[in-house]
Image (cartoon, helix red, strand yellow):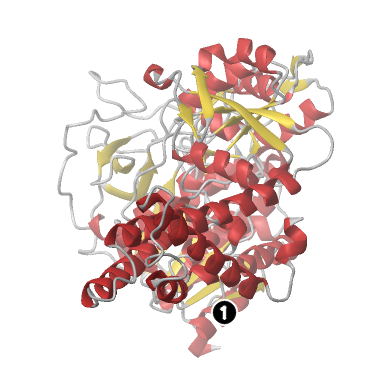
Amino acid sequence: MYRLIDRLPHRRAALVLADGLLVFAAYYCALLLRFDGTVPADLGISGSFQAFPPLAIAVHLGANWGVGIYRIVTRFLGVGQALRMAKSGLFAMTFLLLVVLALPGSRIAPISVVLIGALLSVVAMAGYRVYWRILFENSGAPEGETRNLLVVGAGAAASAVVSEVHRNPSIGAKIVALVDDDRRLKGMRLRDVPVVGTVDDVPSLVDRYGIDEILIAIPSAEPSDMARIHEICSRTTAKLKTLPSLGDLVNGEASLADARELRIEDLLGRPKAEIDVEAIAEFIRGRRVLITGAAGSIGSELSRQISAFHPSQLVLVDKDESALYHLHEDLRKLGASSYSVHPMSVSVRHKVEWLFARVRPEVVFHAAAYKHVPLMEVNPDEAVITNVKGTAILAETAAAYGVERFINISTDKAVDPVNVMGATKRIGELIVRRMAIHHPGTRFASVRFGNVLGSRGSVIPIFRRQIESGGPVTITHPDMTRYFMTIEEAVRLVLQAATLVETLPRRDRSSTGVFVLEMGEPVTILSLAEQMIGLLGRGRDIAIEFTGLRPGEKLEEHLVCCGEEFAHTEHPLINVATLSRALSPNPSDLPGNFDGNLRELIHLAETNADSDKIRAAMMRCAPTYHAQNGNGRAELREFPLPAADRVVHQLQKRGTKPDEGGPDVGAGETEPAFRHFVPDSRPVANR
């Protein structure tokens, strides 16, 4: 019925007419109340009062129009709109009182009638609209059964979801109860929905109320809290969904439409990293930013987050044209405009130089790399061409074209690497470090961190596919551990680290130029698999099989190399790797004849040399690269260590300061010929 009325062409005129009738009725009722139902003839509707209703109607309708009452869609009437009506009624009452007081001899209406009539008018007009809203909601209720929802949480997000469900019955859901661990809320009601217990009571409540779906409405919940809630709710047959985190909610406002299936990231992630948004915004805003590997997991998230800080131009480079197009679609949906996409390889020097000459980037984030460990073990030449040669070309070109900052994305697999992929990333770190020493005009740095949850190379997508197909879930070794963080957090901290590049010494031998993100405690892959089976297995028995370590895999990863230790920055989750002075010579220092060894390595890769020769050349470039002994544990080669300290991985305790100072390597050294790392790398002007 309401839908029919709401579509009438003169709905606003009909609403004005209804308000006029209600105002007349309200003041006439006030007159009857004033005289207990017996109105004197000279004051009644046929007496002096007859002039008052038209005036009251005109004043009330004019006030309603003035405050925008007739621009409100009646079915969305809420507290804000009700306050507008109260404001309109107060204005009308004040005006009518002034008229009555200004004309005391006319006695068109007693003052009490004005006061009571104004109040009744507001109540009547508001009640009329509430009635139509209720009628609309009832008429929109879907046919058939609705699903019963139990909401975990009784805060602002839960209130928004309850309000949305009440307002839109077409959603087909009914929130029957709320639970919250704040025991003081038990027995209270949120928008007329009762709080019936705590999270521990969920299994019994599901049976008692016939719950079909459980919604976790706590966007600020920590991963440990989410894991506990999931463990309790998984004992029931109800579906489990959650609202995204506050940072992921559009405008920070919760909606049932945002509800999604629980993800493993919700259980294993860490609290959102606090970052200095203003510092990042100042660093990015108005600058030309180039991202390599832009279509990958880290690169695409970098692209999305950086676009929100309004660079003057965002240049996206990746050789995967399909993924690059998908990124273009994502950015377009987010409203980004000042960006360009370039399907190209970073290992083609003349293309890189052409692009830099065209766009003149001021900031470069280098995320392009081959990352699949077993695949790179059997294709070391391709790993070198992309991860080593590509990094050298980009770093040299960045220096040649006056880039302000160059940020290289590294990995914990570069720490004392035992595989080709890690070795090439370690050599990439050394290239960037060498450039930082000899090209102080550009701020060079690397950012090293562990696995990111849900990335292409992560085990999570693999486990998900295996679980969805009924198993088995395959794990290489029961003792394998890895560091994990979410992609969003990793990128936020990369951007934060980029703002701290100025704090790195430019020409100090003790500085590696490598930021190391705080990764927390490592997670066993077995426990990760078990949690994912509990999350996605839907009660099925899914087997776990151990297949043995693959080529190039370690049982555990570390965050600092042999001979490195931590120094702390002003951000608690960002450290700097520095060289320990306790080791001399230090295996993590730049090796002798690094330039010549690097040229030889790239030449071997480009000429399809034997894999063993390529690996031997990598060892000369990165002395901490070593082979495995077959059990997955790195076979550490002998390095000179002080007799009193046979520690390979030295992690500095928090609160202590790293050794300061160090020799200036600029004195007495000539600038390395980086332009000879790859064939045909002469300066552009000499070609």
Identify the element where label 1 is drawn: helix
Circle 1: residue type: Leu
Label 1 CA crowd tier, 10 Å (few <14, some 14–19, many 20+): some
Q: Residue at x 36, y 55 (%)?
A: 116
- Residue 286, image x, y percentages: 39, 77
Q: Quadrant of the C terminus?
A: bottom right
Foreground residue, 607 or 648?
648
**As rendered, which of 448 and 148 lies closer to the eye?**
148
Q: Position of residue 370 (x, y in %)?
A: 64, 51
The answer to whether one can see residue 545 in this image is: yes
Q: Which residue is mark 1?
A: 355
Residue at 50%, 65% in the rendered image: 24
In the image, taking residue 328 as reference, residue 280 lies left or right, namely: left
**Residue 145 is drawn in which quadrant?**
top right
- Given residues 261 and 1, the one toward you in this image is 1
Rendering coords of residue 249 (x, y %): 52, 49
